[in-house]
Image (cartoon, grey):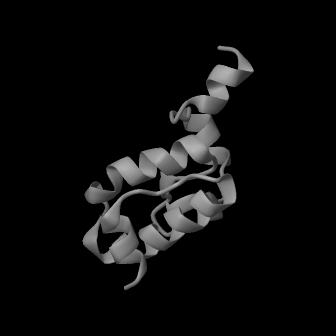
Amino acid sequence: MDELSKMSSDRLTTSERKELDTSEFGIPELREFPIPDAAHVRAAEAYFRYAPEEYKAQLARNILAKAHLFGVNVKSPTILEWAEK
């Protein structure tokens, strides 16, 4: 796999996931929803509905923070609502 393909993928290998700092996850306590790049921000947005209810506000805020950092436009009204809680 060339470097460009790897960068645009939202799939991490087990070793890549283990190497991520806890702060690179949308839910750091659980190390779930990795968001180290723009592709993963989009994936987290797509899978947001599967997050545990008690972590949704935190996840929404973390998705928006990383989206801003990577220049991703989050379109989900659900995430925008949760981020305000």
Residue 1, image x, y percentages: 65, 14
Residue 72, image x, y percentages: 57, 52
Residue 77, image x, y percentages: 33, 65
Residue at 68% from the left image edge and 46% from the top image edge: 19
Residue furthest to the right in view is 3
Residue 80 visible in the snapshot: yes
Q: Is residue 80 left or right of residue 72?
A: left
Q: Between residue 64 and residue 56, name the one nearer to us.
A: 64
Residue furthest to the top in view is 1
Quick check: 1 above or below 64?
Answer: above
Placement of the C terminus among the 4 image quadrants: bottom left
Q: Is residue 70 left or right of residue 10?
A: right
Residue furthest to the bottom in view is 85
Q: Is residue 24 left or right of residue 77?
A: right
Residue at 47% from the left image edge and 57% from the top image edge: 74
Which image quadrant for residue 49? bottom left
Residue 38, image x, y percentages: 60, 46
Residue at 27% from the left image edge and 56% from the top image edge: 50
Residue at 53% from the left image edge and 45% from the top image edge: 40
Quick check: 29 above or below 36?
Answer: below
Q: Is residue 76 left or right of residue 32?
A: left
Residue 28 visible in the snapshot: no
